Amino acid sequence: MSYKKTGVLTETDLKKAHLLPSKERFEKGPVAVIECVEMIPCNPCVYACPRKAISIPQTITNLPQIDFELCNGCGACIARCPGLAIFVVHKNYNNKEAAISFPYEFLPRPKVGEIVDATDRKGQIVCKARVEKVIDSKANDRCAVVTIAVPKRYYNKVRFIKLKHLK
Ligand code: SF4
Ligand code: SF4
């Protein structure tokens, strides 16, 4: 069912918007997944990418497009998106795990090494995750970028976390 009815994006919605990397691209290395499918006047993502991998064709209300071959998954665009819509997925982080990086604006921040609940796009718990990295620089203007490791099979399902003491 479309996100227009459920409010929750699916892989099909992302495919339709040409925003889902191919299976082959996911295998190659970290890559940005831009989960932005509403036609709004917004474009900081375009200027955030040092490799010029993101573009918005013609008019600012069009959806961003990404050149998955130019993107190297650096993550510079994650904290720059006011819609918190950009993720970096590293499917082959190691033999068993994928790494997901996402924007995080809550306090307290998760701690590196902490075991947390990983959630899907709907906010439902999928599995346990280990916090690998928390980037909380001034340049990111209070939006941290958190990276977690999860079982590889969830690389396209997990998109956020729930901290135990916040439940
Ligand atoms: S992850 Fe890095 S290279 Fe890829 S689109 Fe974002 S800023 Fe550009
Ligand atoms: S900055 Fe974020 S919300 Fe704005 S167009 Fe880019 S991806 Fe969409």
Image: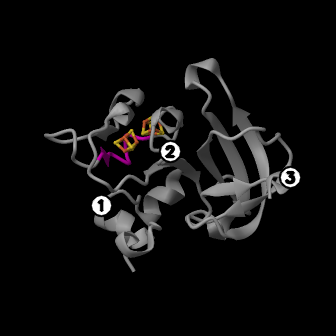
Of badges 2 and 1, the one in the foreground is 2
Q: Which residue corresponds to the image point at 74% horizontal and 38% vertical from the top-left?
A: 107
Tell me the kind of residue under disc 1: Ala
Q: Is residue 82 visible?
A: yes
Secondary structure beneath label 3: helix
Q: Which residue corresponds to the image point at 59% horizontal and 52% vertical from the top-left?
A: 90
Nearer-N-terminus badge (1/3): 1
Of badges 3 and 2, the one in the foreground is 3
Q: Is residue 5 left or right of residue 127?
A: left
In the figure, 9 relative to 106: above or below? below
Q: Position of residue 52 (x, y in %)?
A: 33, 32
Q: Residues within 10 Å of mark 3 (few under 14, many from 20)?
A: few
Indicate yes or no: mark 2 CB to ligand 2 under 8 Å. yes
Q: Position of residue 71 (x, y in %)?
A: 42, 41
Secondary structure beneath label 1: loop
Q: Which residue corresponds to the image point at 37% horizontal and 31% vertical from the top-left?
A: 44
Tell me the kind of residue under disc 2: Leu
* Cβ atoms under marks 3 and 2 closer than 8 Å: no
In the figure, 155 relative to 147: above or below? below
Q: Label 3 to label 2, Cα distance in Å?
A: 23 Å
Residue that mark 3 sits on: 165
* Label at residue 84: 2
Looking at this rendering, what residue extends furthest in the front direction?
167
Q: Residues within 10 Å of mark 1 (few under 14, many from 20)?
A: some
Residue that mark 1 sits on: 17
Q: Is residue 28 left or right of residue 161?
A: left
Q: Quadrant of ligand 2?
A: top left
Secondary structure beneath label 2: loop
Helix, strand or loop: magenta stretch: loop
Tell me the kind of residue under disc 3: His
Nearer-N-terminus badge (3/2): 2
Part of the protein shown in magenta: 64-71
